[in-house]
Amino acid sequence: MGLAISLSIVGVIILIFAGDFLVRGASNLAYKMMISPMVVGLTIVAFGTSAPELFISTWAAMSGSPNLAVGNVVGSNICNLSLVLGATAIFYPIVIKDRSVIVDWFMTIGSGVLLFFFMSLDGKIARFEGIIMILILAIYTYALIQNSRKKTKEKIAKGLEVDEEAGEDVPPLEEIIVWKEVAYFVVGIIGLYIGVTLFGENVLLIAEDLGMSKELAGLTVVAFATSLPELITSVIAAYKRNTDLAIGNLLGSCIFNVLSILGVTSIIVDIDNIQQVILDRDMMWMFGVMLLIAPFLFFFKKFNKLSGLLLIAFYVAYTSVLVVHWLNTPV
């Protein structure tokens, strides 16, 4: 167990450095390409930090474990919007500056509704449904980028400052070298993959050594491990005063988890025999946390320590339900 603990710590250290590289590269590229931090968080960063979910879900579906594929996505979404967002808000307040977050929240909950609808029809996600998901994501991403570039160009035309949302560490526009920032971003993605693999595999071994079943460990440890990139990236982005990128990363990751990960996975192989408990329990908790964050996005325009504690309490309650269900399930 000692080696597993040591490797878990090494994984976390790699995640911290990788998250810093990812945020730097993404923020500078967004500024250079005249795309807002919120949009780059919803697209490029969200896709990068969702890589662990894509790997695990594809492997699970191809290995005949469709419920792990869907459960990983739903569990990660719950973790992102409760534990990760809550921990980030406690570490540093997240101020909502970009008004487009309203559209992004509706897209987040809309993707969840679409997933619920597809699974409710016949208990599976078929290939043609996966294609629909990918098409919706492609249209949404294209519209986000085009709209952001249009707004930035309008600011320039009016002589307004466009770097006030870029983050405190972003250098002057003329000093940004694209290939260097792309390199930072790529190194960050690779580091996140290595870090989450080291942490996830070894924490899972520790959980099993402590007598935890693979089912319970998967529902809790795997979901947390695959959400670590979002946690590290969001905390670093918030610390660097780039709070739009932080909230964009979390909402974008939830959208990508559903539309991209389950979309791609179902195109490769049909995700069938989905357990009813995922629809009746886990999906309801996912919709619950999406509704819980709505007032803070639309009215308070801020996530502070108090709201952070509330979100973490939500995650603790969800995890407790999982544990109680496992304890009451016959072997």
Image (spheres, grey):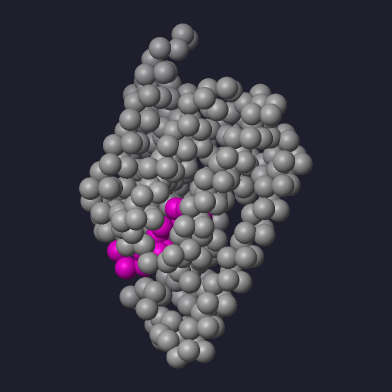
Q: Give the range drawn in magenta.
A: 239-253
How far from the left and from the top, in percent, is residue 281? Answer: 48, 26
Along the viewing direction, whichever of 87 and 98 lies nearer the viewer: 98
Residue under the point 28% across and 41% down: 310
- Taking the image as shown, residue 281 lies to the left or right of residue 5, namely right
The quarter of the picture where the N terminus appears is top left
Q: In this view, does 109 lie to the left or right of 272?
A: left
Q: Which residue lies furthest to the left in this view?
A: 306
Task: Between residue 202 and residue 277, name the one nearer to us.
Answer: 277
117 vs 12, left or right, is: right
The answer to whether residue 203 is seen in the rendering is: yes
Residue at the limit of the structure toward the front, as seen here: 299
Q: Is residue 172 above or below residue 124?
A: below
Q: In this view, does 119 lie above or below 49?
A: above
At x 69%, y 39%, the residue is: 266
Please say if 210 is above or below 237: above
Q: Is residue 277 above or below residue 302?
A: above
Residue 268 image point, x, y percent? 73, 41
Where does the image place residue 205, in percent across and percent down from the top left? 41, 31
Magenta highlight: main SS: helix
Residue 252 covered by magenta stretch: yes
Which of the pair 72/203 is nearer the observer?
72
Question: Can I make out residue 175 in this image?
Answer: no
Identity of the residue drawn at 48% across and 63% down: 100
Question: Left or right: where does residue 11 sit relative to residue 111?
Answer: left
Spot occupied by residue 87 in the image (x, y as percentages of width and height):
30, 48
Identify the image quadrant of residue 212: top left
Is 283 within the magenta?
no
